[in-house]
Amino acid sequence: MQKMDAIYSLNPLNRLDQTRGNEADFKSRRGLDSSVFLLFNGNELLVHDETLCEFSGLQLKQYDMNVHDSVLLGELEGVNYFAISVEDNKNVATRDDDGNFSAHPLRKFPTRLFTEKNLYPEAKLGILAQAASVLNWHLSHTHCACCGEPTQIAHSGWRRDCPSETCGRQHFPRVDPVVIMLVTYGDQCLLGRGHQFPESRYSCLAGFVESGETIEDAARRELFEEAGVAGGDTHYLLSQPWPFPSSLMFGMHIEAKTQKLKIDYHEIADAMWVDKADIVKGLAGDESLPFILPPSVAIARNLLEIWVGDK
Ligand SMILES: [Zn+2]
């Protein structure tokens, strides 16, 4: 099957893992006027004048923001990239004399970026996913899960340490694996819809990988639990960081052994088999079909594109 890059999957940074433990090096890079900073207020990316979301160290000093956490994301062409959590957005806006900041939930951002502003290149979107995901982890891990002490950011933003002498536990950012499945039977594929989906939207079935489970087993288990379909040959196709807040999507292909559906309506609202010809029409924007396919930001759409492009 053809090679394809899902949105958020391209990240050109050298993550500089070998320098993260050097506090002096971190501070030196953090203080450079040439360094690039991505600013987040909670889960929202700050954009200046609807055009700028990469700020220089010089601009950061001018804005005089109330910085909460800083994470060294990496280096690209000699420039250091940081993700920064800004405590309150109003403070930022009042410090800015010649323009306005706006805060954008990242989840809604790529579509708008590509269709209207082309603000951030697709070849770098993985940097936004990296920044959003790690900052979100910091926000939700302010205390030690073992003893309850407030934790301290460490290792250039890639760890939180418990200061308690009797505990001292180190905590690392988490990534949650999710499988999402292109399920086929001959020239048909299985689409389902979640209870929270927009009207008529159908997509690929998906679910979290559980402890002690391979991604292949997880994919077959989710398929059977949600649609009652036994899966046969299963293999990995492509992956996508999905920073809402910290998922890693594994796109899988399962060849179904049977087509008979036994839908678990607690898990999903509906599922149906769809001809490949109708998937082709749906991807081309045909509005006469009884379903709407997922948007271009979703790896589910990539899986369908790979399938119809496969000769
Ligand atoms: Zn502790």
Image (tube, rainbow, N blue to C red):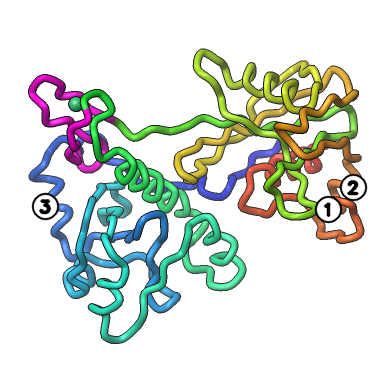
Q: Considering only order in the chain, which callout, 3 or 2, is on the residue closer to the N terminus? A: 3
Residue 89, relative to residue 228: is it above or below? below
Left or right of 301, for residue 143: left
Q: x%, y% of residue 229?
A: 81, 21
Question: How many other residues sit within 10 Å of disc 1, few (<14), some (14-19) or many (≥20)?
Answer: some
Label 1 – label 2 distance at C-alpha: 6 Å
| Residue to which mark 2 is pinned | 278
Q: x%, y% of residue 110?
A: 55, 59
* SS for callout 2: helix
Inspect the image, locate mark 3, and give the three-letter code of the amino acid beneath it. Answer: Ser
Q: Are marks 1 and 2 in contact (CB under 8 Å)?
A: yes
Instruction: Identify the mark at residue 282; answer none if there is no mark.
Output: 1
Q: Residue at x 30, y 76 (%)?
A: 93
Inspect the image, locate mark 1, and give the three-letter code of the amino acid beneath it. Answer: Gly
| Residue to which mark 3 is pinned | 28
Label 3 – label 1 distance at C-alpha: 52 Å
Inspect the image, locate mark 2, and give the three-letter code of the amino acid beneath it. Answer: Asp
Q: Look at the image and tell me in which quarter the C terminus lies.
A: top right
Q: Look at the image and tell me in which quarter the N terminus lies.
A: top right
Residue 199, relative to residue 260: is it above or below? below
Left or right of 284, for residue 298: left
Q: x%, y% of residue 29?
A: 16, 53
